Image: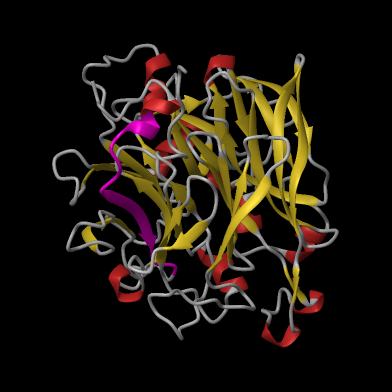
Amino acid sequence: MDPTFYRSPAEAVAAPGEELAYLVAFDPTRQQPDALAVLDVNPESESYGRVVGWTDTPGHGDELHHFGWNACSSAFLHEGHDMAGLARRYLLAPGLRSGDLHVFDTYSDSRQPALVKTVPGEELAERAGYSRPHTLHCGPEGVLLTCLGSAGGAEGPGGIAVLDHDTFEVLGPWETDRGPQYLAYDAWWHLQHNTLVSSEWGTPSMVESGIVPERLLANEYGHAIHFWDLSNGQHIQRVDLGAQHQMPLELRPAHDPEATWGYVGVVVSTEDLSASVWRWSREGDGWTADKVVTIPAEEADPDVLPPVLRPFGAVPPLVTDINLSVDDRFLYVSCWGTGELKQFDVRDPRHPVETGSVRLGGIARAAEHPAEPGSPLSGGPQMVEVSRDGRRVYVTNSLYGAWDDQFYPAGVGAWMARIDADPGGGMRLDPEFFPNGAEFRGLRVHQVRLQGGDASSDSYCYR
């Protein structure tokens, strides 16, 4: 059995730490291939903080975005698996623009993954009726792949496709009754409670060329989360967060398999440019959601702001990712607009308490990294990943090509940082870990996956 499958969160926390990190890199100009890069994250290594492996995709213009493992600890509750032979072997990386799904084998050489298969976007459209693949997780029936658009260039509805666990062929759509769901983004679940949760962003035309201010101010982006019967793909309930709470994106359910709560980050409020974090929970036979964190916008000189923000004279936090430590103790919230990563103690999940903050980049502030004093950074903490033991937090700085250019018109470059988390609360930047610039060969970097699993790619079956 794969030793990186853990029956409980406690087993995962106690397991050996990661030595490698995988991250996707993309060329927004579509002149170079996108790539899967491998970083050495072992502080004892001579190549610590350096790219030690690199595998190109076969074409151009994929815009690799979110990616994940073919299998994880949730396989303990999946039927039809030969657990003796199942392994966290493949990284599946969909191209958000191309629609192609690239399968990388990390087993034979963990530092030099081999591209072993590409599932064309045409297959996704023909067999599942979807396009613009975004996020994937290994689920009970197969790999579940969320998609923003439908086939043939249609705007929607977006939804979830199912891929075969072993061949990664597209089996079809997951939903049997989608109810009122139309917009799509992320999906995750409470395995022990037969419940899938999904969130909303926008249709392809609402995201591919940058945010559309008129549609944002008209509250046309997503503002609800959905609850589904996991075993039969049937919609159960829509929970509206309020039309002003635009773009509930990343879903982070509690790792405790008995829990029935989790967090979702909301990018922006059209009332005051604040961002927020909401906690969902089951109440009786239904589900509810409550705002538990509000992060206000920061005033700024309009002259230093990009055109899209100049009329407001303020920088919205733009909460574009959140992450929950495996022990369900700390919640991390990335504020890509203001250039801040916040840490909250969530031992009382209803009342998060801020316990730490670091600044990197930001639209108006442009904070520097200690590895390069005097060099203000572009972009800000965006994707955030937490090690299984909760001691290390990794952030990268690119959101999505067109949105990068809209909010950081001078460019975002490419960088990755490590933050050390104190078990009692608090954070500090690792001054020795700062791969950036030429290390990534002119590409931008987005999501990180950690060798052996991480806080956002595993769900657990037992206490």
The front one of 215 and 385 is 385
Does 386 sit above or below residue 173? below
Is 15 part of what is drawn in magenta? yes
The front one of 239 and 390 is 390
Residue visible at 67% across and 34% down in the picture: 348
Please indicate, yes or no, whether residue 157 appears anywhere in the rendered image. Answer: no
Stretch of the chain drawn in magenta? 12-28
The front one of 157 and 75 is 75
Please indicate, yes or no, whether residue 293 appears anywhere in the rendered image. Answer: yes
In the rendered image, which quarter is residue 58 located in? bottom left
In the rendered image, which quarter is residue 436 located in? bottom left
Figure disc tally:
0
Residue visible at 49% across and 64% down in the picture: 398
In the rendered image, which quarter is residue 44 located in? bottom left
Along the horizontal axis of the image, is 234 left or right of 432?
Answer: right
- Extreme residue toward the front, this view: 424
Residue visible at 30% across and 75% down in the picture: 438
